[in-house]
Image: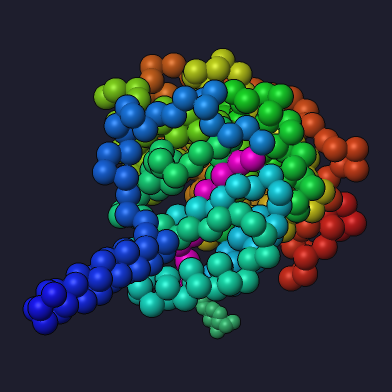
C-alpha cells in the first residue's frame, strides 16, 4: 500500500467520523423538520404505535422562561409513562448558543429515562406545534406550554383516563364557547358548570389529531390555520374544533392534584385557575381584550366551517384526592382552596 492510499484511508476515516459525529449532534439538538410532515406515509397506524407511554410536546418561546422549561422537562422526564419529550422552540431569534446550552442542560439534568430533543421550529407559526412528527412513536401525545407543571401522579391519572377515551381530548384547563343573545354572536367565556374548550396548557390526545389539524380538511382547514397565523392566537381553539367535529363530543376535564401555573407568556390573562367560575365583573381590561380576541377566533372558525362543532362537557374526572391548584395570591403561590 502506497503512501497516497494511506493518506486517502486516513482522510476517508476522518471524513466519516466528522460526518457521523457532527450530523449526530445537529440532529440531537435542532432536528430539522421532516421533509413533508403531511406525506401520507407519515400518518402512523394507530394500532402499531406504543400504547403504554406517551410523547410530550412542549412549546418553548421565551428565553426568560428557560429555567422553568428545564424544571418542567426534568419533571416529565422522570415519569415512567413518558417515552420522549420534544421541546418545540418557536422563537427564531434565539441564538444557537443558547439553544445548545439549553439542550445540554436539559439532557444533563433530567433524571428520567425519557429521551429529550430540542427542535428549532422553522417558523414562529403557532400551527407548527401541531405538525405531525415521524419520531413520535406513541399513540398519545401530551401538548403543553412552558408555563404549567402538572405533578406526576396527575399526569399518570390523566393518561389512564385518556386510555379509556382515546378519541377525546383530555386535560386540566378548560374554557367555553357561548352565544351572546344580546350581541347575537359566539363568544369565548367561562361557565361554572360546563366547558367545551381544552387549553394547550395540558392537552392529552391521540397523535392522529396532529395529522387532522395540519394536513387534512382541505381549503377550509387551510383558511382556519391562516386565521391562527393572522390572530397569532387560537391554535388551541382550532384543535378543539377539529376534535369535536370528528367526534361529536367535547373534551374531558381531569382534576390535577398539584398544578403550578406561571401564566402564559402570550396571554398573561389566562393566569387564573380552572375553577374561577364566571366573574366578568372586575376583569382586567387586558383580560377582556384577550377574551374578545378569542371570541373573534370562534366566530371566524364558525364562519369558515359553516357550523358550530364545539360540544359541552360537564363535570370533571378526579382521582379521589381532588384538585389542589396553586393560585397566585398577593404575589405568593398558595393552594387555591386555602386562599
Ligand atoms: C445551563 O446551565 C448553566 C449552569 O447551571 C446555567 O448557567 C445556564 O444559564 C443554563 N443555560 C441554559 C440556556 O439553560
Q: Position of residue 199 (x, y in %)?
A: 59, 41
- Observer able to see residue 263: no
- Horizontal arrangement in the rendering, residue 223 relative to residue 79 (left or right): left
Which residue is situated farthest in the front direction here? 1
Q: Answer above or below: position of 322 versus 74.
A: above
Residue 61 counted in the magenta span: yes
Residue 163: image quadrant is top right
Query: Could you tell whether 129 is left or right of 338 in the image?
Result: left
Q: In the picture, which quadrant includes the N terminus?
A: bottom left
- Please name whichever residue, 49 or 232, is drawn nearer the observer in this view of the structure: 49
- Which quadrant, please, contains the C terminus? bottom right
Q: Main secondary structure of the magenta part?
A: strand
> Residue visible at 19% across and 72% down?
9
Name the image colouring. Answer: rainbow
- Asked whether 60 falls inside the magenta stretch, the response is yes
Q: Is residue 81 visible?
A: yes
Q: Nearer the viewer, residue 205 or 106?
A: 106
Q: Quadrant of ligand 1?
A: bottom right
Magenta residue span:
53-64
Q: Is residue 48 left or right of residue 337?
A: left
Give the x, y percent position of residue 305: 38, 20
Q: Residue at x 64, y 57 (%)?
A: 113
Q: Residue at x 27, y 39 (%)?
A: 36
Q: Is residue 162 above or below residue 22?
A: above
In the displayed structure, 173 sits above or below 335; it is above
Image position, residue 41 (x, y; %) = 33, 29
The image quadrant of residue 11 is: bottom left
Q: Position of residue 318 (x, y in %)?
A: 83, 35
Amino acid at each position: 500500500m502506497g503512501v497516497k492510499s494511506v493518506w486517502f484511508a486516513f482522510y476517508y476515516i476522518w471524513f466519516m467520523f466528522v460526518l457521523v459525529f457532527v450530523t449526530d449532534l445537529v440532529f440531537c439538538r435542532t432536528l430539522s423538520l421532516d421533509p413533508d410532515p403531511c406525506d401520507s406515509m407519515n400518518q402512523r397506524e394507530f394500532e402499531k404505535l406504543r400504547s403504554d407511554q406517551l410523547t410530550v410536546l412542549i412549546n418553548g418561546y421565551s428565553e426568560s422562561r428557560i429555567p422553568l422549561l428545564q424544571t418542567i422537562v426534568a419533571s416529565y422526564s422522570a415519569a415512567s409513562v413518558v417515552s420522549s419529550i420534544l421541546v418545540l422552540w418557536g422563537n427564531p431569534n434565539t441564538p444557537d448558543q443558547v439553544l445548545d446550552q439549553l439542550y445540554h442542560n436539559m439532557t444533563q439534568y433530567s433524571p428520567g429515562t425519557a429521551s429529550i430533543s430540542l427542535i428549532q421550529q422553522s417558523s414562529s407559526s403557532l400551527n407548527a406545534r401541531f405538525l405531525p412528527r415521524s419520531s413520535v412513536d406513541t399513540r398519545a401525545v401530551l401538548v403543553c406550554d412552558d408555563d404549567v407543571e402538572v405533578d406526576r401522579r396527575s399526569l399518570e391519572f390523566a393518561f389512564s383516563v385518556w386510555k379509556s377515551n382515546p378519541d377525546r381530548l383530555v386535560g386540566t384547563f378548560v374554557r367555553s364557547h357561548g352565544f351572546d343573545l344580546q350581541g347575537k354572536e359566539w363568544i369565548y367565556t367561562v361557565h361554572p358548570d360546563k366547558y367545551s374548550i381544552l387549553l394547550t396548557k395540558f392537552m392529552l390526545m391521540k397523535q392522529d389529531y396532529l395529522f387532522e389539524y395540519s394536513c387534512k380538511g382541505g381549503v377550509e382547514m387551510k383558511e382556519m390555520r391562516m386565521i391562527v397565523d393572522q390572530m397569532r392566537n387560537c391554535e388551541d381553539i382550532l384543535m378543539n374544533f377539529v376534535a369535536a367535529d370528528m367526534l361529536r363530543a367535547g373534551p374531558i376535564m381531569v382534576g390535577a392534584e398539584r398544578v403550578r401555573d406561571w401564566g402564559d407568556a402570550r396571554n398573561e390573562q389566562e393566569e387564573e385557575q380552572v375553577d374561577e367560575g364566571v366573574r366578568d365583573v372586575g376583569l382586567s381590561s387586558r383580560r377582556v381584550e384577550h377574551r374578545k380576541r378569542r371570541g373573534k377566533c370562534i366566530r371566524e372558525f364558525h364562519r369558515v366551517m359553516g357550523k358550530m362543532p364545539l360540544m359541552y362537557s360537564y363535570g370533571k374526572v378526579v382521582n379521589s384526592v381532588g384538585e389542589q391548584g396553586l393560585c397566585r395570591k398577593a404575589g405568593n403561590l398558595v393552594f387555591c382552596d386555602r386562599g
